[in-house]
Image: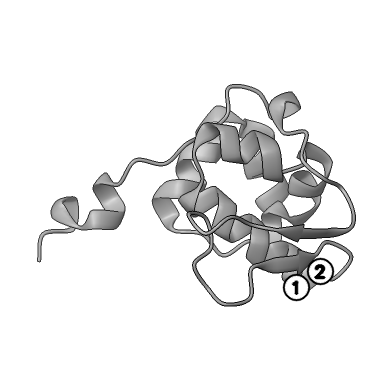
C-alpha cells in the first residue's frame, strides 16, 4: 500500500496557534466526552503520569482545536511531550509549529 494514501498520512489533525491557548486543567480527574474517547473508561487522574500521557495522546490525536484548548494544559504538555506515543505525522505537525517541543523530545 502506498504510504501517501494511508489514512494516518492524510487525516486532519488540529494544532493550536499558540501553546498559551492550552488552558485546560492541570490537576484533578478529567472525563473526556465520547467524541474524544469512546472507551468505557474516559476519566483520567492527572496526578497519575500514565493516565496523563494516555489522555494527552487521545486528545492530541482525536481533538478539534477547541478540544485542545479545553483539555490540554501547556505546562503539562511540555512536561509529558517527550514521553507521548504519537503518530509520526502528528508529532511533526506539533513540532514544526512549536520547535522547542522538538528540543524537549531530543
Image height of 103 relative to 40, above or below = above
* Res. 75 mark: none
Q: Give the residue drawn at x 47%, y 36%.
A: 14
Name the side, left or right, on which 87 lies relative to 49: left
Image height of 92 relative to 41, above or below = above
**Mark 1 crowd level (few <14, some 14–19, many ≥20, 10 Å Cα):** some
Along the line of sight, the residue nearer the viewer: 23 or 35: 35
Q: Give the residue drawn at x 48%, y 54%.
A: 35
Which residue matches tag 2? 49
Q: Is residue 73 visible?
A: yes
- Picture quadrant of residue 57: bottom right
Q: Give the residue drawn at x 66%, y 34%.
A: 69
Image height of 34 relative to 103, above or below = below
Give how far across and how far down residue 100 sits, in percent. 69, 35
Residues at marks 2 and 1, CA–CA distance in whole angstroms: 4 Å
Q: Residue furthest left?
A: 1
* Res. 50 mark: 1
Q: Is residue 15 visible?
A: no
Give how far across and how far down residue 98 sits, in percent. 62, 31
Name the side, left or right, on which 35 lies relative to 51: left
Give how far across and how far down residue 16 sits, in percent. 57, 29
Q: Are marks 2 and 1 in contact (CB under 8 Å)?
A: yes
Along the line of sight, the residue nearer the viewer: 11 or 99: 11
Give how far across and how far down residue 59 sits, in percent. 58, 52
In what element is the residue under mark 2?
A: helix
Amino acid at each position: 500500500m502506498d504510504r501517501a494514501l494511508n489514512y494516518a498520512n492524510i487525516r486532519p489533525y488540529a494544532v493550536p496557534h499558540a501553546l498559551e491557548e492550552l488552558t485546560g486543567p492541570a490537576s484533578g480527574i478529567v472525563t473526556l466526552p465520547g467524541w474524544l474517547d469512546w472507551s468505557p473508561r474516559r476519566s483520567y487522574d492527572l496526578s497519575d503520569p500514565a493516565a496523563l500521557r494516555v489522555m494527552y495522546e487521545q486528545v492530541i490525536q482525536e481533538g478539534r482545536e477547541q478540544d485542545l484548548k479545553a483539555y490540554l494544559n501547556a505546562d503539562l504538555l511540555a512536561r509529558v511531550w517527550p514521553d507521548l506515543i504519537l503518530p509520526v505525522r502528528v508529532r511533526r505537525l506539533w513540532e514544526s509549529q512549536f520547535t522547542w517541543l522538538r528540543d524537549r523530545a531530543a
